[in-house]
Image: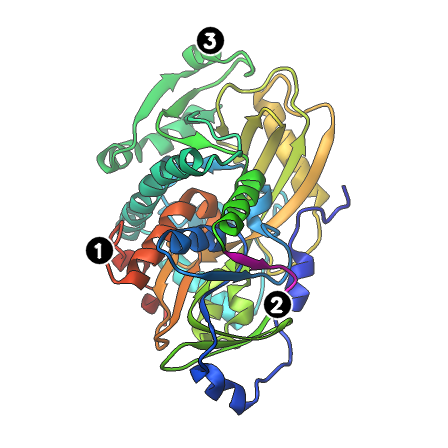
Amino acid sequence: MSPGAGCPASACAGIMGDVSPDPAIVSAIHAEHSLDCLVVGAGVSGLATALALLDDGREVTVIDAGRIGGGASHGNCGTLTPSHAPPLAGPGTLARAARWMFTPDAPLYIKPTLDPDVLRWMLGFALRCNARDFEASARAKYALLADSRQRIQQWVERYALDCEFAETGEDYVFRTRRDMDRELHDVPLLRDLGVDVEVVDGPAYEARDPAFKPGLAGALCFRGDAALRPDRYVAELARVVRERGGRILEDCPLHALDSGTQGVVATTGQGVLRARTAVLATGAWAPRIAEAVGLPWLRRSIQPGKGYSITYSPPELTPKRPVILYEPSVCVTAWPSGYRLGSTMEFSGYDDSLNQQRLGALERGAAQFLHQPVGPQVQEQWFGWRPMSRDDIPLIGRAPGHAHLWMAVGHGMMGVSMSASTGQLLADMIAGRSPCVDPAPFEPARFA
């Protein structure tokens, strides 16, 4: 594969432009012929929302600046993890980030910058790194993750989604007792939330899974998690959306969006589209289109967090369950069709280079734990930008000041895990019925 395979850089160039709609276009929103629901973004959140709206009997059109699933939906590790409710912003995050500041291949890397939007985001993030906000974010995320975990399984069965879904569970595996003890502090909160977690010592875990080298300190085993192949899941969502009458327009960048009392007017690369309702599901591109959609505050609310992965043909000996190798922060997932090492978090703006040093860190981290850390053949090297909100909670709900514009952005590293519940929550709110989860923690107005 080419160095940029799987990355969304090509889509970035076309998502905005210098197009300023004529005032006559805005008034045309009152025209008799318009779309029902317009979803901007054909990633996992946009397509899940489209499916939930179609289930409500709505007519749906999805547009995307690039191709279906061309962003962070493509190359992540595909785990469905209520266990991952604790947010990135925690009491120890700032100290770890400071230690890693000058280590370019560290699991968390923050590139020094003077960009005012980034600095405001960093300040807001730093203020969340306390015990009270940590717990509040974890509770909000868990509600969405737990609902979505079950809802995705229902969708797999109902729509025959061919995406290698399996009720695997997932494990955090440790080589040092110090790190394991630190994570054990979160176990009471996780159990209070409803996470089924088992604490296993090192020798017992090594006996369970021969893929691991000796010398483990132990593991936390989460029985309720699951996994799927994310690129296939997104492709299957697109298939079902089309089969149910939805329309998906690829290579259709959004240049501007104007809203009025009766609906919205979207100026796109394929012409002007009028719709009664619009949903913004643009992932990490949300800050870049903030001005164009009349939401300038998005630039200081969401920042791109760059992640990497390498996909191989499977080695002979793979972990029995998806695992997080804790100290190097490497996720390992094995499917029948492939084997993936992924993770890392890099705040470096929209840098579109494929950093071989950080890719190498995935392999070096896996080699600390596994007898066969890589597969015999590299199928893809990938990076993608995750949409990281300041509080690590997604923005789901009506856009402040816009009667007919809704939002599904800022899912961070949990876009796939939260996808089905995000779509259902938006469909519920748009229909005006009781929502599947409490929408209050996800209210976009908290940042406006």
Image: 174 above or below 213: below
Do the residues bearing badges 2 and 1 touch, measured as CB atoms within 8 Å?
no
Main SS, magenta region, reads loop
Nearer-N-terminus badge (3/2): 3
Q: Disc 3 to disc 2, how far (Cα)?
A: 52 Å
Whether residue 390 sits left or right of residue 102 in the image: it is: left
Q: Quadrant of residue 80?
A: top left
Task: Point out the residue furthest to the right here.
Answer: 2
Image: 237 above or below 191: below
* Residue 211 coordinates in the image, percent (x, y): 56, 15
Q: Quadrant of residue 142?
A: top left
Disc 3 element: helix
Whether residue 187 sits left or right of residue 78 in the image: it is: left
Q: Quadrant of residue 57?
A: bottom left
What colour scheme does the image use? Answer: rainbow
User: Which of pointers 3 and 2 indicates the residue nearer the eye?
Assistant: 2
Nearer-N-terminus badge (3/1): 3
Which part of the image, by quadrant, shows the C terminus?
bottom left
Q: Which residue is mark 2?
A: 253
Question: What are the residue bounds of the magenta stretch?
Answer: 246-253
Disc 2 element: loop
Q: Disc 3 to disc 1, how far (Cα)?
A: 48 Å
The answer to whether residue 345 of the structure is visible from this angle is: no
Q: Residue at x 59, y 84 (%)?
A: 20
Q: Number of labelled discs?
A: 3
Image: 409 above or below 174: below
For residue 207, which numbered disc appears in the image? 3
- Check disc 3: other Cα within 10 Å, few if <14, some if 14-19, many if 20+: few
* Residue 197 coordinates in the image, percent (x, y): 32, 26
